Amino acid sequence: MQIPEDQLRAGHIPADLYRQIPPGTDVRRLVIVQEAPRSYKGPIVLTLVIAAGSIAVLLVVAYVVQVIAAAAVAVISASGGISYTINRRHK
């Protein structure tokens, strides 16, 4: 029994806890409550949600920029500001 959890499971009270017990306390009726181990589920889920949200925002921004660029090219070409021609040479 090297760690306090093993001592508590075996019914032994570690010395540091034993010193905190008030004098006159019946040790046989003593209940020691341990803190639950830390759960990493919350931080992992939060990280995944933030990553997915960031990717979604980037995709939306890319789509909006593409639509704005296409609309700008259409307006400029319709007003005669830009022309695009394809020349084919016949042999």
Image: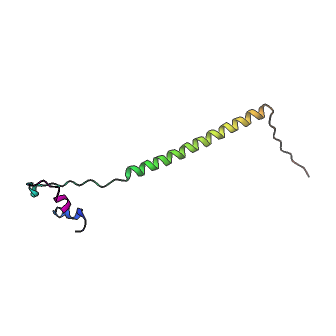
How far across and down, in percent of the image, does residue 73 sit?
73, 37
How far across and down, in percent of the image, does residue 47 sit?
45, 50
Above or below, 84 relative to 35: above
Whether residue 48 sits left or right of residue 75 in the image: it is left
Give the farthest residue toward the bottom.
1
Who's the residue at 86% across and 47% down the image?
Answer: 88
Residue 14 visible from this viewpoint: no
Along the line of sight, the residue nearer the viewer: 7 or 80: 7
Q: Is residue 21 magenta?
A: yes
Whether residue 3 sits left or right of residue 55 in the image: it is left
Residue 45 visible from this viewpoint: yes
How far across and down, in percent of the image, does residue 60 sit?
58, 41
- Number of numbered tags placed on the structure image: 0
Which corner quadrant holds the N terminus? bottom left
**Which stretch did the figure color magenta?**
15-23
How did the renderer colour the structure? Answer: rainbow
Whether residue 82 sits left or right of residue 5 in the image: it is right
Above or below, 36 relative to 80: below
Who's the residue at 55% across and 42% down the image?
Answer: 57
On the image, which quarter does residue 24 sit in?
Answer: bottom left
Who's the residue at 66% across and 36% down the image?
Answer: 68
Q: Is residue 3 magenta?
A: no
Give the farthest residue toward the top.
79
Give the farthest residue toward the right.
91
Along the line of sight, the residue nearer the viewer: 83 or 19: 19
Whether residue 53 sits left or right of residue 6 in the image: it is right
Above or below, 74 relative to 1: above
Who's the residue at 58% across and 44% down the image?
Answer: 59
